[in-house]
Amino acid sequence: MNGDSFVSTQTPAEPQALTPVERQSVLRTLKSPRLLKTEVLAGLVVALALIPEAIAFSIIAGVDPRIGLFASFTMAVSIAFLGGRPAMISAATGAIALVIAPLMESHGIDYFIAAVIMAGIFQIILALLGVAKLMRFIPRQVMVGFVNALAILIFMSQVPELLGVPWLVYPLTALGLLIVFGLPKLTTAIPAPLVAIVVLTLITVFASLAVPTVGDKGELPESLPALFFPNVPLNFETLQILFPYALAMAFVGLLESLMTAKLVDDVTDTHSNKTRESWGQGAANIITGFFGGMGGCAMIGQTMINVKASGARTRISTFLAGVFLLILVVVLGDIVALIPMAALVAVMIFVSIATFDWHSIKPSTLRMMPKSETTVMLVTVIFTVATHNLAIGVGAGVLTAMVLFANRVAHFVTVTRTVEEHFDQEIAKYVVDGELFFASSNDLYTQFNYAEDPEDIVIDMHQSHLWDASTIAALDSITDKYEKYGKNVDVQGLNQASANMRERMGGKLGGGH
């Protein structure tokens, strides 16, 4: 289902149709039975998909499954009100579980929950410091690599569910895939993932098929979450223990959430408030911690089920995902436990295929794209998949993009030498053209004929700009070298910013060549 699927023709009783650039509001959705039905069903599908994931991530973190399920409930409900990206789903995630699992193993549940609360505080601080603005420095190919890597990770996470299982799992999964891929071509009135889950559950129950179910993943809670205050000493030693885990969780959570928000922006053709999303994630983690949850962040898989597969567009679907999750596990736990894992595997495989940017690996695209851009995408994918850590993958991609960009720009600087005569006196004139920074200025020193030049040298900087201390140091080294030969150098044409920088730092950096 595409980003403007909610634009379809409406009955006269319903509000006027939306254009793709308009955001579907909560009030508008509540007035439209058709739009509201889409949000409700999307929330139900997401809730069903969240249950086995939350249990699995709880196991990764080394905590009781109820802690992951309660975290998914409080995160989804909280972010529905606090977040800056409508229709995005936040819950307990594998990225957070991997970061914080060692703390649970070494210090137990109280320190674990305290770290979740501290991570939320860090996220609010980072939001106030403007961390969301850093998103502009993430190149498009890193974003493409991020999406492709997550699609691969979502698919890989389903592989264990298909190994060492009864043979009946395979035809059930195939039927589930047939429904999620085929049904939308016939009708989009009901989300295909929901139909797949219901149909496969009915088949396994009425045919009494012995296949793995949600109930096999772990015990579902029988009561509502209660307030929890971690019993940890309030001293510097505790802070030292919690700090590295909380900071890592804060960064990974914000990175995954902001990247997912950007992806949803693209899918829905709407903008989101990244700063609000940042502090909203922090507040949601604090709330989750005080209810004994394991914390979390945005989930790309469930978000794509909500936005792309089910067509949801508002906070209603996010809120209902959390509410339905709680009702399903607490009130209807016995029924939910009967859902075959094959149904959820089929849904998640569909999500991974729908999430992957297939255009990015077409031969025609690869031929057209500069090799450096393809390299950035591949580095992001490889590091993310190899480490299962989004922060490392995106960091490696951004670093690769920076190095390749600096290397490319470094070759754009040219130095042209001419020898002119003024009043029977020879003058060597050098015209420097290009942007001078640490990468391009390192070679500048070698572009001059110190021994062969006449006594007077003019360096014309009209067509260049000095960006950093490395360039000032290189210019100092050039003038110093000429002075050793007893020659005069006149640097001309610096723009005001470059001249101010040279006046402030020139001759004070030391070292040189």
Image: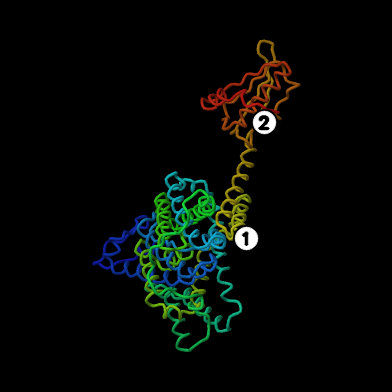
- Which residue is depicted at the point 35% across and 61% down? 315
Q: Are marks 2 and 1 in contact (CB under 8 Å)?
A: no
Please identify the quarter of the rendering in which residue 385 is found: bottom right
Tag 1 residue: 386
The amino acid on which the numbered mark 2 sits, given as a three-letter code, is Leu
Please identify the quarter of the rendering in which residue 85 is found. bottom left
Question: What residue is rendered at 45% in x and 71% in y?
Answer: 51
> Element under label 2?
helix
Query: On the image, numbered disc 2 is attached to which residue?
Result: 444
Tell me where residue 117 appears, x and y as whole percent: 44, 55
Q: Based on the displayed image, in which of its 4 quarters is residue 456 positioned?
A: top right
Q: Is residue 279 above or below residue 316?
A: above
Along the line of sight, the residue nearer the viewer: 28 or 358 = 28
Quadrant (top left/top right/bottom left/bottom right) for the N terminus: bottom left
Please identify the residue farthest to the top as the structure is shown. 423
Say which of 201 and 77 sits in front.
77
**Residue shown at 41% from the left, 49% from the top:** 275
Q: Is residue 327 left or right of residue 342?
A: left
Up the image or down, 117 lies above or below 443; here it is below
**What whole-number distance in Å separates the C-alpha atoms at marks 2 and 1?**
40 Å
Residue 441 place in picture, x, y as percent? 64, 33
Image vertical order of residue 193 relative to residue 248, above or below:
below
Residue 92 position in % (x across, y down): 47, 63
